[in-house]
Image (cartoon, helix red, strand yellow):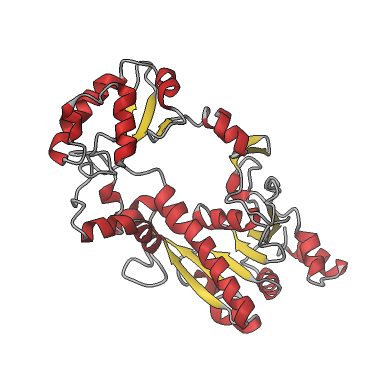
Amino acid sequence: MTGPLRGVRIIEFAGIGPGPFCGMMLADHGAEVIRIDRPGGFMDPRDPLSRGRTSIALDMKTPQAVEIARDLCKSADGIIEGYRPGVMERLGLGPEVLLADNPKLVYGRMTGWGQFGPYAQSAGHDINYIALSGVLHTVGRAGEKPTPPVNYVGDFGGGGMMLAFGMASALLHAAKTGEGQVIDCAMTDGSALLAGMTWGFRAMGRLHDEAGVNMLDSGAHFYDTYRCADGKFISIGSIEPQFYALLREKTGLDKDPAFDAQMDPAQWGPLKDRLTALFATKTRDEWCALMEMTDVCFAPVLSLDEAPKHPHNVERETFVTIGGATQPAPAPRYSATTNDVPLAAPEVGADGDALLAGLGYDADRIKALREGGAVR
């Protein structure tokens, strides 16, 4: 692999969701990511979250497997684990042990609630974490219940991506100082941070503490989605005066004085009703022909089938084919290094012998570990 993280070795203890997303990001940018899988596990070659790895399958119920995991961590720059607090310690692989073995190790811990706090030992999912951080309260339309934004905000933005940033930061610190450390990455904390601008608007008196009545949460007529005559949707984000003026010009509303009241929340509802009726008179393609690639701040709302085929995404190669499936390409891009197209996820345990040999295990020892069931 090439990329700015080339030469960095990460050990990933297999999990679901945000941990693998962090591993994917690090692998996408050139790190060698070795995944410790459970025997009998499965990685789908079509799954972006599992791409770019090597895999060893260890039965962590055996002391020999724990010893192998410890040896792998001695050889690594960082590790990623997403178990409940205390699980790694009970395995004998907690931070005190692994940092004693390897003082430069960056020990990344991914949880929903964090390593401490009243909720720390409770089960949860994205919807719960962003509920507790206040984020879910802000997502939805006026008078309706909060709408879960899939699991983008907790698992991936506030979780896996936040941990990837933390890993990169701590790896840089370790390279400069020789000092490793533990990263406590909680999706409650991360999702709260993603809402930084929302908290700023609230502090400045520019945001009501309810959903669907503010400028960016579907309250405003100039920042929303609209259904077209063919049942498809467009998005409008004409916030700045010059962009709003162009929206009015393109829609034939530039001479209508009612639309002068852009920033009067009392007028947003009636103006939105008028835009709703107007946008329903043409198909999405007709509105695209009129407003696409202008300064209206406009884009069609594309389906997952449509997005990879759009000319902008095609030219930028925003999507790639890996393992026979369409996947998002690595991002962002760099001027001095290149992110390779990632390899599809391997079979679980496919690289076990090679990884053990790289640690100095001889063939007889590897055979004995396989026969004993520690390595599968």
Front residue of 170 and 101: 170
Please say if 198 is above or below 141: below
Name, please, the residue furthest toward the right: 363
Quarter the N terminus occupies: bottom right
Q: Residue, x 82% and y 71% (percent of image)?
A: 361
Quarter the C terminus occupies: bottom right
Q: Position of residue 220 (x, y in %)?
A: 24, 38
Front residue of 37 and 340: 340
Please say if 49 is above or below 132: above
Please say if 264 is above or below 187: above
Q: Looking at the rendering, which quadrant does residue 212 occupy?
A: top left
Q: Looking at the rendering, which quadrant does residue 57 occupy?
A: bottom right
Q: Position of residue 305 (x, y in %)?
A: 53, 28
Q: Position of residue 158 (x, y in %)?
A: 43, 57
Numbered marks: total? 0
Q: Position of residue 295 (x, y in %)?
A: 40, 35
Horizontally, residue 24 falls left or right of residue 271, namely right
| Residue 226 visible in this rendered orientation of the protein | yes
Name, please, the residue furthest toward the left: 266
Horizontally, residue 139 falls left or right of residue 40, namely left
Q: Residue, x 62% and y 34% (percent of image)?
A: 315
Q: Looking at the rendering, which quadrant does residue 277 occupy?
A: top left
| Residue 238 visible in this rendered orientation of the protein | no
Q: Residue, x 39% and y 36% (percent of image)?
A: 297
